[in-house]
Image: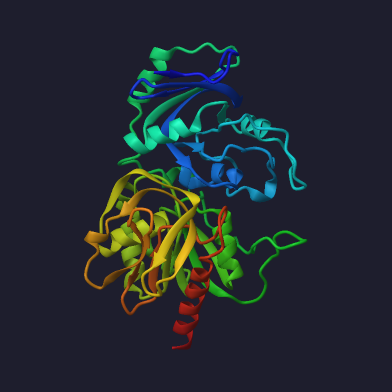
């Protein structure tokens, strides 16, 4: 079944593995890519979403129709270049109207080799994702509008998918580095942290810059290590605490080398805090299991309930796998749950400063309801230092 939203010849085509076709107007880079297709319900933050390393191997459908109208700027990148394989929007990106804009979305994508498409029924596409699960797709942009449909469908069907795929190795840093930049503040941008702080080793499974900024703003002296770091390499820094970052791919695949490292850190009895993939990595190290979701959680408006306090937080999420709460071992409690579907959104080791959440408390993009988790991590390190 085909979809075309304009009488003009389409210049972009999205082919699903089941043969469904969507046509639209291409922008950004030209060429073809294959990936898993997801949708994101956030109303802001498209630049942060496209540069979030957790989106490696995925094309993002934006349900909010006005994407591109604030342009792009160097400050909002979560990593050096877009990591998501492509973007799909309802309306063609317009000329930006924002005082922070430095560039238009289309040329920005083109320079960085990412394909975009506008002018399609994103509601219909979102319904398809919800009903059949995140589909495998081939995505093409050709200004001449010439598409080999049979080849595109074949490429979509040949895509291996994210299950069993370790993508953290592709997006992690090549070597360790220090981080001292704090959260953005008017009018000077990102200030530098000064003075002595808690020594934190952050394991980079695909870390977003704003997570590192939040750690620095919470009083942490951050050293970032690659995903492949061993427990010995982590502990050699004599950290006050260890942070496990977000990242893409199948947690079980990354866990093949990350879980032994985390177990070694746990044996050292240090405060540990994990986010997103880091949450899943911690759960695996503690003996739990992870499972692939039907279409995942992607947006900046997800309600999560704190089971300890009863409070509801509106959170930012981006994950296609989840921790199986039924597999949590004795001594590990569920702390947060999604109010959309009841899936696990947080765990903690009883009577120890070891905890993690599935969502993104750094709010980039998203609400600030959950920043307290960074302060909780800092308080745990302070308590250990004063013990």
Please tell me which residue is depicted at 62% across the width and 47% down the height of the picture.
77
Task: Say if residue 238 shows up in the picture.
Answer: no
| Closer-to-camera residue (272/256) | 272
From the top left corner, tell me how far across and down residue 385 is, in percent: 48, 84
Specify whether 81 is left or right of 384. Answer: right
- Residue at image position (77%, 47%) is 99
Residue in the picture at 46% in, 39% down: 39
Residue 352 visible: yes
- Which quarter of the figure has residue 334? bottom left
- Up/down of 308 relative to 297, above or below: below
Nearer to us in this view, 333 or 339: 339
Position of the C terminus, as image quadrant, is bottom left
Residue at (22% x, 60% y) in the render:
327
Where residue 105 appears, as percent x and y from the top left, is 66, 35
Task: Answer left or right for 311 relative to 197.
Answer: left
The scheme the figure's colours follow is rainbow
Q: Quadrant where the N terminus lies?
A: top left
Label count reads 0
Q: Is residue 279 left or right of residue 238?
A: left
Instruction: Say whether residue 29 is left or right of residue 360.
Output: right
x and y percentages locating residue 51 in the rendered image: 56, 44
Would you identify the image quadrant in which residue 367 lies?
bottom right
Q: Nearer the viewer, residue 387 or 319?
A: 319
Q: Is residue 343 above or below residue 84?
A: below
Residue 373, x across and y down, in percent: 48, 69
Q: Is residue 354 above or below residue 54?
A: below
In which quadrant of the rendered view does residue 304 lie?
A: bottom left
């Amino acid at each position: 079944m085909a979809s075309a939203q304009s009488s003009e010849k389409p210049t972009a085509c999205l082919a699903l593995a089941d043969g469904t076709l969507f046509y639209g107007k291409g922008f950004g880079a030209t060429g073809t890519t294959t990936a898993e297709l997801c949708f994101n319900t956030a109303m802001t933050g498209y630049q942060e979403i496209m540069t979030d390393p957790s989106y490696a191997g995925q094309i993002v459908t934006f349900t909010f129709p006005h994407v591109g109208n604030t342009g792009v700027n160097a400050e909002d990148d979560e990593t050096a270049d877009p990591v998501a394989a492509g973007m799909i929007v309802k309306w063609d990106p317009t000329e930006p109207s924002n005082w922070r804009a430095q560039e238009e979305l289309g040329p920005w994508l083109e320079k960085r080799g990412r394909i975009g498409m506008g002018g399609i029924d994103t509601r219909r596409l979102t319904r398809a994702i919800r009903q059949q699960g995140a589909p495998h797709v081939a995505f093409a942009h050709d200004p001449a509008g010439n598409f080999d449909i049979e080849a595109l469908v074949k490429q979509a069907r040949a895509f291996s998918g994210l299950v069993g795929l370790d993508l953290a190795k592709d997006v992690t840093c090549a070597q360790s580095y220090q981080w001292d930049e704090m959260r953005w503040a008017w009018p000077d941008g990102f200030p530098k942290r000064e003075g002595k702080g808690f020594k934190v080793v952050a394991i980079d499974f695909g870390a977003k810059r704003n997570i590192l900024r939040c750690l620095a703003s919470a009083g942490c002296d951050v050293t970032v290590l690659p995903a492949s770091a061993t427990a010995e390499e982590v502990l050699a820094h004599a950290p006050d605490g260890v942070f496990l970052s977000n990242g893409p791919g199948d947690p079980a695949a990354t866990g093949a080398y990350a879980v032994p490292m985390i177990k070694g850190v746990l044996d050292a009895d240090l405060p540990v805090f994990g986010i997103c993939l880091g949450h899943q990595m911690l759960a695996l190290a503690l003996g739990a299991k992870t499972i692939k979701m039907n279409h995942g959680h992607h947006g900046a408006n997800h309600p999560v309930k704190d089971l300890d306090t009863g409070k509801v937080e509106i959170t930012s999420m981006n994950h296609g796998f989840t921790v199986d709460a039924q597999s949590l071992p004795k001594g590990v409690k569920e702390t947060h749950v999604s109010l959309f579907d009841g899936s696990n959104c947080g765990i903690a080791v009883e009577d120890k400063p070891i905890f993690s959440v599935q969502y993104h408390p750094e709010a980039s993009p998203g609400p600030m309801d959950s920043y307290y988790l960074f302060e909780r991590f800092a308080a745990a390190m302070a308590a250990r230092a004063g013990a």
